[in-house]
Image (cartoon, rainbow, N blue to C red):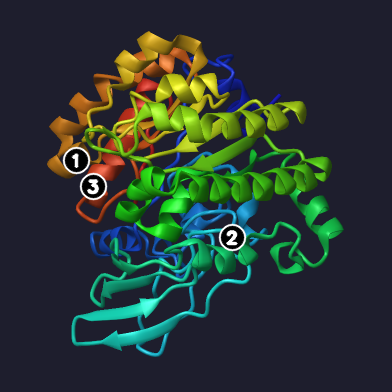
Amino acid sequence: MSISARERFLGICRFERPGDLYLRDSFWPKTLENWVKQGAPKEIATPKFGDQYRPKSFLYDYFHFDPRPQWLTEVISGIGGVFVHQPPQLDTGIVLVWEQYTPVVPSYEPRIISEDKRTITYTSGDGQTLKVFKDNPQKMPTFLDWPVKDRATWKEYKKRLDPHTPERWPSDWNAYVREMNKLGEETPVALEVGGFYGYLREWIGSERILYMFYDDPGLIEDMMEQMLYLETEVIKRVLKDIKVQQATFWEDMCYKAGPLISPAMVRKFMMPRYKKITNLLRSYGVDVIYLDSDGNVEQLIPLWLEAGINYIWPFEVAAGNDAVAIRKKYGKDLIIGGTIDKRALIKGKEAIREEVMSKVPFLLGQGGYLPTIDHTVPPDVTFENYCYYLNLMREVAGLAKLSFQ
């Protein structure tokens, strides 16, 4: 009798299926465009940004991927990430993919401020002012300004973070509940519950927020309390009706040498709020609680575990994260995701084999491991190298190789 993707996903997360490979990845649109030129089927270059995340897409079938958890963010406006919304095509004909990152409802009206031959400067759906290059609009933009600067601007911004705003929710909630619960019979379903540092940084800016923790901690507390209220109300409404297998925080609070704020500040400002959210989630039976943060996260792992977060991704290798050492240190307390160095896939087959064989057999055999490239597959990776990587992963897991014709 076959087992559903949902059951396999939960079994792996609960360390009940050592050796089971649950594999999927995400890609920059330019990567897929390049691969078509290199001989991949034209259908993998999906016409809409975000199609690569849909489990029934050609891309998923072609690479034999396991379903990425279906994020409820695709309908519940805003509580989610950059890939949730298909951004508008502006007058220049350039599709700007960094359109809405934060859970603001209503969003700001995107507006072009200026443009030249190479760049566009515009206001995003988050109220940020950004500059992007026309020849590569998917690349990380240059951030020029942010909507929250002080208590007065926060008072206005806060109005967009009301969990009960009708536009935040599907107009036919009962139909949406039936659709998601039907999907969840086979595919894992995830609820984006937000975060604390990550979203505040998007409102305030990286430099200003670090000063604000010292200069106006009361304002930081007020912002985090509003996020806690928003997250709590969303969780209660969703989990009352929809069966969810994973909850997801987005934080991005580290860089290559460690956290952007001290562990002491995480403990003071964030951990009490994390605990309220994770306790609420577990009261509804959600025991896979995921956190996405780039950079070197090793100093924060014990705090996140103490706060009830047990699944971390992507463990970027370039930032010094050692997944094998982390598994040995934390054992079955921690679900590990990501970990495959994207740079190895750029270098070639020998580097790919060294990267995979140095960690995957051990981590896969331990269980609680959901490998991906340690973020999104970049355009520098060739189609040939990626196919070699996939078949090597399948070989380690004892699966038949695929023929990419």
Give the side of residue 231 with respect to residue 34, left or right: right
Give the side of residue 369 with respect to residue 106, left or right: left
According to the picture, the residue beneath numbered tag 3 turns out to be 384
Which residue shows up at 61% across the image and 45% down it?
Answer: 225
- For marks 1 and 3, the one nearer the N-term is 1
Which residue shows up at 47% across the image and 79% down it?
Answer: 110
Relative image position of residue 397 (x, y in whole percent)? 41, 22
Relative image position of residue 135 (x, y in whole percent)? 23, 75
Name above or below for residue 85 compared with residue 336. below
Name above or below for residue 357 compared with residue 269. above
Assess whether mark 2 and mark 1 are in contact (beta carbons under 8 angstroms): no
Q: Is residue 42 visible?
A: yes
Crowding near the residue tagged with mark 1, few <14, some 14–19, many ≥20 C-alpha atoms within 10 Å: some
Amino acid marked by disc 1: Arg
- For marks 1 and 2, the one nearer the N-term is 2
According to the picture, the residue beneath numbered tag 1 turns out to be 343
Crowding near the residue tagged with mark 3, few <14, some 14–19, many ≥20 C-alpha atoms within 10 Å: some
Amino acid marked by disc 3: Glu
Q: Please tell me whether mark 1 sits on a helix, a strand or a loop.
A: helix
Crowding near the residue tagged with mark 2, few <14, some 14–19, many ≥20 C-alpha atoms within 10 Å: many
Which residue shows up at 53% across the image and 29% down it?
Answer: 271
Amino acid marked by disc 2: Gly
- Mark 2 to mark 3: distance in Å? 37 Å
Viewer-nearest of discs 1 and 2: 2
Tell me where residue 278 sits by quadrant.
top right
Viewer-nearest of discs 2 and 3: 2
**Disc on res. 142:** none
Relative image position of residue 330 (x, y in whole percent)? 43, 12
According to the picture, the residue beneath numbered tag 2 turns out to be 78
Quadrant where the N terminus lies? top right
